[in-house]
Image (cartoon, rainbow, N blue to C red):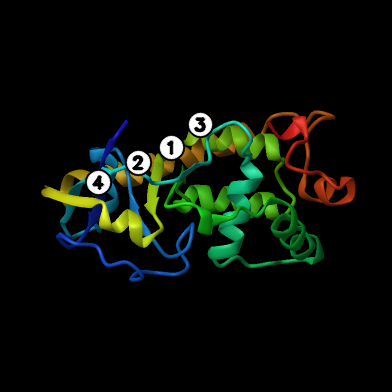
Amino acid sequence: MAEMILYHGSVSIIEQPTFGKGKRHNDYGLGFYCTQSLELAKEWAVEEKRDGYANKYALNLQGLTILDLSQKGFTTLHWITLLLQNRVFTLKNDITKAGKNYLIEHFSLPLKEYDIIKGYRADDSYFAYAESFLNNTISVKRLSEALRLGNLGEQVVLMSQKSFGQLNFLGYEIADAATYYPLRRARNEQARMEFLSNRQGTPTPDDLYLNDIIRGGIEPDDPRLQ
């Protein structure tokens, strides 16, 4: 695949994204956040009473390195660790604080080696899942299942100046708030309900909670994390 079509939902038309501009506390840090789904881009573009735009781009992948968190070898804990390094969490107790330090020490990834990151988007529900895990109330297994059930979509994030230079603007489509804001809310509500339903399952002896990971010295190659 020499080219990838991407969409960026926004309240603005963005013909030329600027490297180094944006919010530092996004899921994976400073970058240009896109999706391969036009429909998701339109949902992410709108506010309750404000239309938006799904900006369309062609990304030339020649020479770009991609970190795909869905590939074998990466676990849900790698995703959680990226969030811990970038998003703002409330660390409620000593287990949470120790867990943050442990995950960053053992599950950090060398992001500077990659031009592109692909992975889950921590929308409201997914962020709540992550906080539940960090507060030791759900296991890694339950968290992983919730992420797969939620259907909130993956994002593709341009992280390097090189990737920005290989992005070509193709145009845009208008996202109507009256249509796409209810869809966005419904998708998030569905993810929340599926998470609550899945959370009610009976724990098994193999379930790993945050305190188990710390006490057991769990490493990324542990088969229970796959």
* Circle 3 residue: 149
Q: Is residue 111 left or right of residue 142?
A: left
What amino acid type should be assigned to the residue bearing mark 2?
A: Ala
Badges 2 and 3: C-beta atoms under 8 Å apart? no
In this picture, is 34 found above or below 10? Answer: above
> Secondary structure beneath disc 2?
helix
* Circle 4 residue: 7
Q: Residues under labels 1 and 3: Cα distance?
A: 9 Å
Label 3: few (<14), some (14–19) or many (≥20) C-alpha neighbours in 10 Å: some
Label 4: few (<14), some (14–19) or many (≥20) C-alpha neighbours in 10 Å: many
Label 2: few (<14), some (14–19) or many (≥20) C-alpha neighbours in 10 Å: few
Give me the disc on residue 186.
2
State the image quarter where residue 152 is shown: top left
Is any part of residue 86 visible from this angle? yes
What amino acid type should be assigned to the residue bearing mark 1?
A: Gln
> Secondary structure beneath disc 4?
strand
Q: Position of residue 158 (x, y in %)?
A: 37, 54
